[in-house]
Image: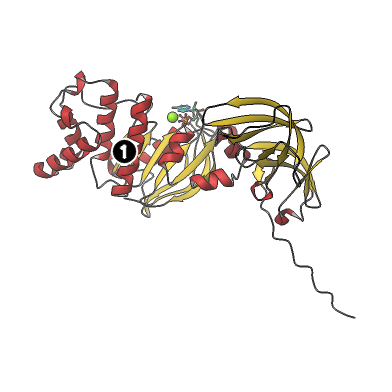
Amino acid sequence: MARIELKNLAHAYQPNPKDAADYALKPIDHVWQDGLAYALLGPSGCGKTTLLNIISGLLKPSQGQILFDGTDVTTRAPQERNIAQVFQFPVIYDTMSVYNNLAFPLRNRKVAETNIRSRVEEIAEMLDLSADLEKRAANLSADAKQKISLGRGLVRSDVAAILFDEPLTVIDPHLKLLLRRKLKQIHARFKLTMVYVTHDQLEALTFADRVVVMNDGQVLQIGTPQELFETPRHTFVGFFIGSPGMNFLACRVSRGKALVGSAQIALAADYGALEGDFELGIRPEFLKLHATQTLGSLPVKICENENLGSCKIITVQLADQQLKVRLGEEETPPTTAGFLEFPAAWIRLYAKGLLVEPEPRKQPTQEVPP
Ligand code: ADP
Ligand code: MG
């Protein structure tokens, strides 16, 4: 397994890129640690496959380098990189049996037949393919074929990394959940470096140790699911992750308070020195909605109450801006008007889409007596 280093890596499909818009992948510098499971998450067309194919060697980047364990592999072909890749659609040999399909990557590496048998059986067991080993791949369902593809990706234990490009797209929802769990177990057991592309936040957040959030060719944040949830470094990350996503309110910050219209929201002490126009971000989960006024809560109009079974999403209006509040299924929200509390610890501020780091308040300098 390898540590993967991306050095000033970028890619444009057209030959003479002029500005940022010409790049399918804008410059990225990052080290991906050995043995961790990464998810590349972002909307369709944001550059996930481009980045994955550069790592695997299917695509040569227009600038920068990729290092596996310190060795520059930028110009090496996929076969020379010792990686396994699983694609969106099954890549299998239809005429071969399931067993031979799974054994193929091992035979290619001249692994002894007895070792092949035990490894193939182990992988088949994990993917519930044991009963199908002697069947011809051609006769199986789309789901089973994709499981074979996954198995072919997982069968070698000596690869530098396993790369998955939306591998569960063709799988039905119930099996998807099971396979996602299986992949996570396999990762936990073998500590493989895995990179998993998906546009589905749930898939990314449940599978990965680190999630790489991309939009428009750019990597916006790399973090643990908790970091992305609690402290998105970009408003896109806040909005894209969570259901519903983070609320953003245009506000004016002054003297430790954020002003939304005439409503005053108290900020954490760390933001005390800040002045100017910002976006205030807060997750629907962290807002509190009361029927009667509590200390510091602000009057809001209730616009909508959506009951999703396991939770309730309430749309409220503060000044001229709307926010979503997420309540537990057992909570009963007020019907037409209520009071909204903004816990200061969960308020984040953004300027031009980027997180503004709070600054610890400076200690007043001691006056020197004359
Ligand atoms: P994702 O996998 O996130 O959906 P891709 O990496 O496939 O995104 O695509 C990123 C951008 O690059 C898109 O705008 C897409 O249209 C463009 N693109 C992808 N492949 C090619 C190609 N072979 N030639 C030209 N443009 C491409
Ligand atoms: Mg793609």
Q: Is residue 306 left or right of residue 115?
A: right
Task: Give the amino acid type for the residue marked by disc 1 in the picture.
Answer: Lys
Q: Is residue 155 left or right of residue 341?
A: left
Indicate the quadrant where residue 300 lies. Answer: top right
Return the residue nearer the eye: 297 or 85.
Answer: 297
Q: Is residue 41 left or right of residue 108?
A: right
Indicate the quadrant where residue 243 lies. Answer: top right
Residue at point 29%, 24% (across, down)? 143
Percent position (x, y) of residue 218? 54, 39
Q: Which residue is mark 1?
A: 182
The reply to whether residue 19 is visible in this rendering is no
The reply to whether residue 248 is visible in this rendering is yes
Return the residue nearer the eye: 184 or 344.
Answer: 344
Percent position (x, y) of residue 327? 60, 35
- At mark 1, the secondary structure is helix
The quarter in which the C terminus is drawn is bottom right
Residue at point 60%, 45% (across, down)? 233
Return the residue nearer the eye: 141 or 328.
Answer: 328
For label 1, count other residues whose C-alpha is less than 10 Å away and answer few (under 14), some (14-19) or many (20+). some
Tally of numbered discs: 1
User: What residue occupies the far top of the structure in this picture?
Assistant: 139
Note whether ligand 2 is within 8 Å of mark 1: no
Q: Is residue 96 left or right of residue 297?
A: left
Up/down of 72 relative to 285, above or below: below
User: What residue occupies the far bottom of the structure in this picture?
Assistant: 370
Up/down of 273 relative to 327, above or below: below
Percent position (x, y) of residue 20? 59, 36
Percent position (x, y) of residue 105? 21, 37
Q: Tell me the quadrant of ligand 2.
A: top left
